[in-house]
Amino acid sequence: MRISTIAYIFKQGFKNIWRNLRFSLASIATMAACIFLFGVFLSLVMNFNNIVHTAEEGIAVVVYFETGTKQEQIDQIGNDIDKQPGVAEIHYVSADEAWESFKEIYLEGEDESMEGAFKSNDNPLANSARYEVYLDDVEQQDTLVKYIEGLDGVRKVEKSEVAANTLSSFNKLMAYVSLAIVVILLAVAFFLIYNTITMGISVRQEEIGIMKLIGATDFFVRSPFVIEGILLGAIGAAIPLGILYGVYERVINYIVTKFHMLGNFLQFLSVDDVFHLLLPIGIGLGVGIGFFGSIFSVRKHLKV
């Protein structure tokens, strides 16, 4: 294809937008609103998933050992657990470490006679040696617990069942809600692009007929409308993404500054982390909706 032909197609695509400016602006505005809402929602979902993942990393499966279990066997149990899928980290706490931690938490500042009631070699938590196992995915907790319970030398396994089930339910709920909202937004944007291209075709039917009479190919006639749809989608996506990029960091800083408690235990993603995913998806959705909306409209309404 000649460069002049490509230039003509793009020129006509821009002209189509200008000829049908009111509908074009309506399509761009609606596309921008849809992509903006999608971007806001995706940012919320990404931050929520990050918060949930951070919370999941703090949920430990605690493994206690049978009385008299030798250190070699304890080490082997740890190695076996560490090899299991989904295990992010495993931390061994000896009985002495457990007792020292207990004293720091519960006996600090108490009368010295409280701590002195125990002999230097007397550890009331002698059977409290344990592994604290942290997972990548809390949904794998039950599978891991069943495996650990079957290991020789394991006395008891404690798991955070309520917390794990709650986080798992939230993950599933967010996935379903995300899918539903994305489908609705895509449908609305597609419908508007489709109608805009259809309106442009109806306005230019006579001109298209003349072009066909003088030998214009189907591709030559249809391409400007496809370019129009792509341009509408790209512009409609670029505007809200630019706004979101400028606003996101300010909103996060405001939340952290205004609500100190949230900032202390919630780790928000940076704008670069969010846009690493949002930018290609947002532009891809805008261009894709514009392309397919124009293709469907051209095939149905443009008789060439």
Image (cartoon, rainbow, N blue to C red):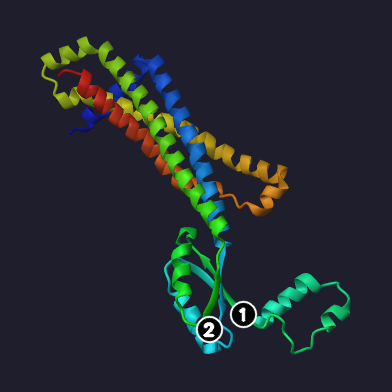
Which residue is at the front of the view, 138 or 148? 148
- Identity of the residue drawn at 37% across and 22% down: 192
Count neighbours of disc 1 (C-alpha within 10 A) and say few if under 14, some if 14 to 19, many if 20 or more. Answer: many
Q: Quadrant of residue 34?
A: top left
Residue 8 visible, this angle? no
- Identity of the residue drawn at 56% across and 66% down: 60
Q: Amino acid at mark 2?
A: Ile
Q: Position of residue 172 (x, y in %)?
A: 46, 47
Q: Calculate the distance from the C-alpha at mark 1 to the C-alpha at mark 2.
A: 9 Å
Which residue is at the front of the view, 260 or 135? 135
Q: Quadrant of the image for the N terminus?
A: top left
Task: Identify the disc placed on residue 74.
Answer: 2
Q: Amino acid at mark 1?
A: Ala
Name the residue beneath numbered marker 1.
Answer: 129
Q: Quadrant of residue 18?
A: top left
- Whichever of labels 1 and 2 marks the residue nearer the N terminus, that label is 2
Q: Quadrant of residue 156?
A: bottom right
